[in-house]
Amino acid sequence: MRIGIPKEIKERETRVAATPTLITKLVKQGFEVLVEKAAGAQASFSDEAYVAAGAELSDSVSVLGCEIVLKINRPTASEASFLKKNSLLIALMEPYRSDDLLEKLATNGVNVMAMELLPRTSRAQSMDVLSSQANIGGYRAALEAATHYKRFIPMMMTSAGSAKPAKVAVLGVGVAGLQAIPTIKKMGAQVEAYDIRPEVKEQIISVGAKPIELELGEEGSGTGGYARELSEEGKKKQQTLLAEKLKKFDIIITTANIPGRKSPVLLTEESLKGMRHGSVVIDMAAANGGNCPLSEADAIVVKHGVTLVGITNYPALVPADASEFWARNMLNLMALFVTPGTPPTLNLNLEDDIIAGVLAVHQGQSRLKK
Ligand SMILES: NC(=O)c1ccc[n+]([C@@H]2O[C@H](COP(=O)([O-])OP(=O)(O)OC[C@H]3O[C@@H](n4cnc5c(N)ncnc54)[C@H](O)[C@@H]3O)[C@@H](O)[C@H]2O)c1
């Protein structure tokens, strides 16, 4: 049985779904592994390293024609056309996008695991690419903030005078926010953080930040550990209260997200006008509309004297470790349904809640809840 590792072709993508370390383990399990030439080059994994790990180098069409295909991003229509009947594709699929990619794959008999659908339970944690990549994203976003800020992050006392530490607010404290806080705090910033789910307060304190509290008069916790969308009145109230609180901050890192919906607006144009010139907003939600409507996806813009950074793929800026973590997630996921051997066998047992949750297309049928 063959596993194919294509080179990612999405713009600005530098990661690869399998590293040489993973290949060694897959080969031991009895798989033949085909890696597209230069698939890992941007993540610092050479073709030679893949060959030394036991892979065969190949072209895109052969790799996509394998029985299992591991990818980071959803395939383009052209890539999808090379996937074979009864094969298994594992990738981020953006399952709620309103196009017919998943239906086409179902028609062609391709089985698909959409990593966004993995249940967020303790047992699934070691397979969860959203968490492993958000963690890296939060770290890298904090570095980006420090780079764009035109002053020091820590307090500085020098013979030429002293500088105050940067005041940083992190808005949205899920996996990314929980990593952004300690990363920028370690650089010497004073950090405060806000999340709509009240249960996050303890976690904010545990990573060394001060919680920002707002009286919204409505509940922000939804199901499965995620936030709930606020009423229109609640959204307005949140924006107004935040605008007042955020005036004192030099750097704002926003990560707020509600799966399947446009990102909530936390920073309005009025809030930006209230900020100091030279302040920095790192809008980690820029791909999905942004937590600030003035930020632009994959651009760095200055509005009202505030630098807005709209990078949409932070893990791709740490591609070697991001790929290693991704590959480990894949190894753990595959352990659920692979029996090693010559050849290895697969059992997609729908009684396993993880397999049932992550399978978006199985045996010609889309399993997405409409
Ligand atoms: N295996 C597990 O148990 C597991 C795995 C992953 C995540 N989780 C938990 O799931 C939760 C969500 O994680 P995530 O990082 O994927 O979240 P996410 O990226 O979807 O969202 C980021 C944060 O934005 C917050 N948010 C949404 N709307 C907001 C608003 N209007 N104002 C302020 N904040 C807002 C959310 O509450 C969330 O904390 C976290 O508590 C995380 O710890 C659990």
Image: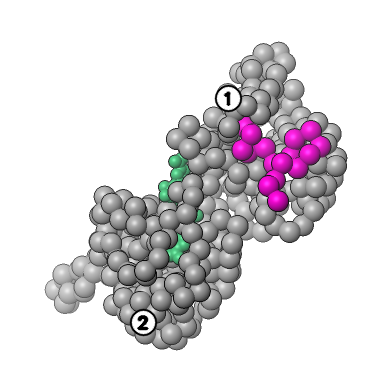
Query: With respect to residue 15, does 198 lie above or below?
Result: below
Q: Which residue is mark 2?
A: 275
Q: What is the total number of numbered labels drawn onto the structure image? A: 2
Relative image position of residue 108 (x, y in whole percent) = 85, 40
- Residue 346 magenta-drawn? no
In the drawing, does residue 68 fall left or right of residue 183? right
The residue drawn where x is 80% and y is 43% is 105
Visible in this render: residue 342?
yes
The residue drawn where x is 31% and y is 51% is 203
Looking at the rendered structure, which numbered label has been put on residue 304?
none
The residue drawn where x is 56% and y is 62% is 312
Residue 44 appears in which quarter of the rendering? top right
Q: Which residue is mark 1?
A: 335
Q: Relative to the observer, which residue lies in front, 304 or 41? A: 304
Visible in this render: residue 60?
no
- Residue 368 magenta-drawn? yes
Relative image position of residue 282 (x, y in whole percent) = 45, 68
Relative image position of residue 348 (x, y in whole percent) = 68, 27
Q: Amino acid at mark 1?
A: Ala
Q: Seen from this angle, which residue lies furthest top?
A: 342
The residue drawn where x is 29% and y is 66% is 212
Q: Callout 2: few (<14), some (14-19), or many (20+) C-alpha neighbours within 10 Å?
A: many
Residue 299 appears in which quarter of the rendering? bottom right
Relative image position of residue 92 (x, y in whole percent) = 64, 47
What range of the chain is rendered magenta? 355-370
Query: With respect to residue 280, does 353 lie above or below?
Result: above
Q: Relative to the observer, which residue lies in front, 290 or 214? A: 214
Q: Secondary structure at mark 1?
A: loop
In the drawing, does residue 177 fall left or right of residue 314? left
